[in-house]
Image (cartoon, coloured by chain):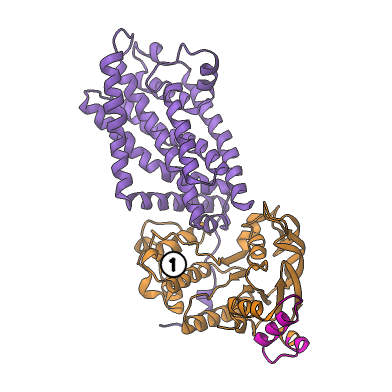
Chain colours: A purple, B orange
Amino acid sequence: MSALTPTTALLAEPARRPTWWRELNAVVAVTARDVTLALRTPGMIALSLLMPIVMMGLIGGNLMENMAGGLPFDFGQFMLVGMIVNMLVMTTTMSMTSLIDDSDSDFSSEMLVAPVSRYAIVVGKILGSSFTALITAVGVIAVGLVMGLTLSLHAALGLLALAPLMCLSGGALAVIVMGSIKSKKAANLVVMLITMPQMFLSGVIIPIGSSTGVLFVLSRILPMTYCVDLARAVVTAGTPEYDSVVLFNPAISLLAIAGLTVVCLVIGTWLYARSERER
Amino acid sequence: MTPVIEVEDLVKQYKKTKTPAVDGVSFTVQEGEFFAFLGQNGAGKTTTISILTTTLAKTSGTVRIAGFDIDRQAREVREAIGLIFQRPSLDRTMTAEQNIRFHAAMYGLYPYRPSFRLMPADYRDRVTRLADIVGIGDGLFKAVAKLSGGMARKLEIVRSLVHTPRVLFLDEPTQGMDALARRNLWDYIDSMRRELGTTVFLTTHYIDEAEGTDTVCLIDRGRIALCCPPAEMKATMGAATLDDAYVAYLRSRPGLDATTLGEVLVESGVRR
């Protein structure tokens, strides 16, 4: 053991940096922690690669063989794009249950006592959760290739550019759940109750252009509806299929995703911070 | 002297409980003061410290830390404080150093980088030296899950000292630590107080650790029973040591029989 008497240099703190830099640094630190944890959990990575086989290979393959006839567009590509978005949003939403793990292990106290905004913590958690989501999305593309479904380089790059926004929208919705529920079992159940119907209501695998009544309303308030539509707009831009598969103007979709994400983020972060302090 | 902790009529009633855990507590701590909060389990020490450090919402009352209101200026309060939690708040899957790096990044001290070797030299030096001071140098790159309880406690201490707070809250900081590490820690904290004027707010089961404090507050069933310098407390209770003063206070409490007193003394660390 050495240096039992600390010097003033050791006692003195490094110079404080501007607030914006610190917020960004906190987001990076929280994100990096979740990425590190994911990499240390091989089971999680394996599951991320297994999900596309089940969702795209089994469910998608079955739908393609039995329901794809007579449609005015390529159902395979319709579903491929939907599944990529679904995996990004759904996996991010599911991974956000780690907020409850942090709370159970008291690690959330360490995060919440830090002098950074609660938004930096929540956004960092969402971006960290997006890591496994990106793996599943790549898995969907790989399974699609095996099934003979391909994306152009332009389309793939477009989807990659939109991926962070899509993950953010799914994660923001999840924060509302995590801020309202303290039990991991209950949270898993609620996340499942949100993500599964969302897959059908948002037009991931079934067109929703003819939805009416409650189904119409639900489809329009879900951020994933606009994520899926925007992704299809990017992939089919300039092709004859565009009008058959795209419901909204891409600018409207982008605004809707941003708006709904901000609303969910504000409500969710408030609920999360409150749930940690109010006992 | 400037007050750095101002607590007025603080009340905390947890949900689904009949009585408040903290019931109208008021006290002031001056800048640079070494202040100890003593009391048995469930007396309200950790509840108070949790409210003061913004991790728990109060029911009523006002609290100002370093001149900032804990509700309206929580960020400024967090900026001014450091905290060692009573319950471990480490990520057990990460290494000891990764936990410290995470903390340093959250406090904006150093840019976050994906490995220790990529961190700035100043960070590496600071962490290595702090780890040596509390005797955790050998375990710095081990997963927390593989560290003993005492080592994990030392890690929490290193983590809280990576930044230099104006007010340092220590909630049972030396629980599970060996004598040498305890001595080294107190030497380090004394240096901080002497050289930087750091205010220290301590809760402890080791009553002897409170002997060197400027003020001792006894909290009992959510209320402050006594609050004065240790010498005055000893004189008031007619005791030679703070341990004895604490025992004398407990004995003077109405409704405390010998068996219960024995249990209280054991859980308070006075009798081991």
Q: Amino acid at mark 1?
A: Tyr
In which quadrant will I find the N terminus of chain B?
A: bottom right
Q: Quadrant of residue B205 in the image?
A: bottom right
x and y percent of residue B170 in the render? Answer: 59, 71
Binning the other alpha carbons within 10 Å of mark 1 as few (below 14), some (14 to 19) or many (20 upward) gives many
- Would you say residue B106 sits in the magenta stretch? no
Residue A108 versus residue A33: which sits nearer the camera?
A: A108
Residue at 60 percent across and 82 percent down: it is B270
Q: Chain of mark 1?
A: B
Q: Is residue A204 left or right of residue B77?
A: left
Residue at 39 percent across and 15 percent down: it is A245
Q: Is residue A132 left or right of residue B258?
A: left
Residue A212 in view here: yes
Q: Is residue B92 above or below residue B233?
A: above
Give SS at disc 1: helix
x and y percent of residue A261 in the render? Answer: 53, 33
Which residue is tagged 1? B123
Q: Quadrant of residue B272 in the image?
A: bottom right
x and y percent of residue A247 in the render? Answer: 45, 15
Residue A221 versus residue B206: which sits nearer the camera?
A: B206
Residue range (magenta): B234-256
x and y percent of residue A260 in the render? Answer: 55, 30
Q: Quadrant of residue A76 in the image?
A: top left
Residue A130 versus residue B209: which sits nearer the camera?
A: B209
Farthest residue, direction bottom: B240
Prevailing secondary structure of the magenta residues:
helix
Q: Is residue A237 above or below residue A127?
A: above
Q: Is residue A3 above or below residue A247?
A: below
Q: Is residue B154 above or below residue A235?
A: below
